[in-house]
Image (spheres, rainbow, N blue to C red):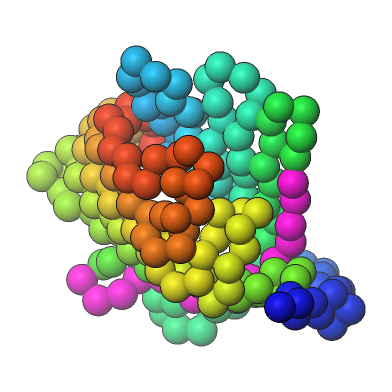
Amino acid sequence: MKRWVLRAPVLALLAWVMGVVGAAAQTMDDHVYWFVSFEELEYRPGPAEEPLVYDAEMWVGGDMDRLWLKAHGEQSTLEPAGHLEAQALYSRTVSPFWNAQVGLRLDREYGDGTGATRGHLAAGLQGLAPYWFHVESFLFLSQDADVSARLEVGWDMLFTQRLVLEPEVEVALALQDVPEWGVGSGLNQIELGARLRYEFLRELAPYVGWSWARRFGEAADLARAEGQEVSRGALVLGLHWWY
């Protein structure tokens, strides 16, 4: 069956989004603020190769309109190989605790002298749910009209004013198979994590934790076919930093 490809309409939408982001940059509030953070900057020690993992974001803007930049990825400790997901988003405050965001997402895999890249439109909500749950829910439309979604939920459990446990869960789903990216239709992956940090400074906190991920359905079958693990758990050591 031929894949349904809508490159021209998607490119038109990309141009529209860039126009929205540019207009937002010109109409931000009078008071402009900015924020940078590494939610995760960690190493997974072990006898086998374990990657360096990073999850960073920054924003600039006012109380209502902001430009967000996000980057998440892994880098091999043995060779110049890994993957990167980068996002550029226009964010608009829609309630005291929620922001609607729309923009672009770029995926990049590299290593062994080869690489692959694909783009997406991204739209979603980010904010605080009741009981102070941090929530990010996004819908993605790739350049080949593949639809996927992701939900991330985390929260801070304070044992003391400085000792904080942060459990989190991430769920990834897709409507279509994309074998070249290890994506299957339906539920693709669930990732659970818990990181215990000690805030020597509010802006700087080393942490230790555990991360576990499990692929499901067709995504698991694709991983097995490539000789990859379907389930993995790892001790993590890292640094939480913001400014």
Task: Say which quarter of the image contains residue 136.
Answer: bottom left
Residue at image x 10%, y 44%? 159
The verdict on residue 127 being magenta is: yes
In this orientation, does residue 206 appear? no
81 relative to 176, above or below:
above
Quadrant assignment, res 211? top left
Identify the residue shown where x is 62% and y is 54%. 181
Identify which residue, 200 or 187, lies in the foreground: 187
- Residue for point 32% across, 45% down: 231
Magenta residues, start to end: 116-131
Q: Residue at x 45, y 21 (%)?
A: 49
Relative to 70, does residue 55 appear above or below in the rendering?
A: above
- Give whichever of 196, 8 is nearer the camera: 8
Residue 212 seen: yes
Is residue 45 positioned above or below 75 on the image? above
* Magenta span main SS: strand
The answer to whether residue 235 is left or right of residue 106 is left
Residue 53 rendering spot, x and y as whole percentages:
48, 35
From the viewer's perspective, tell me whether residue 165 is left or right of residue 241. Answer: left
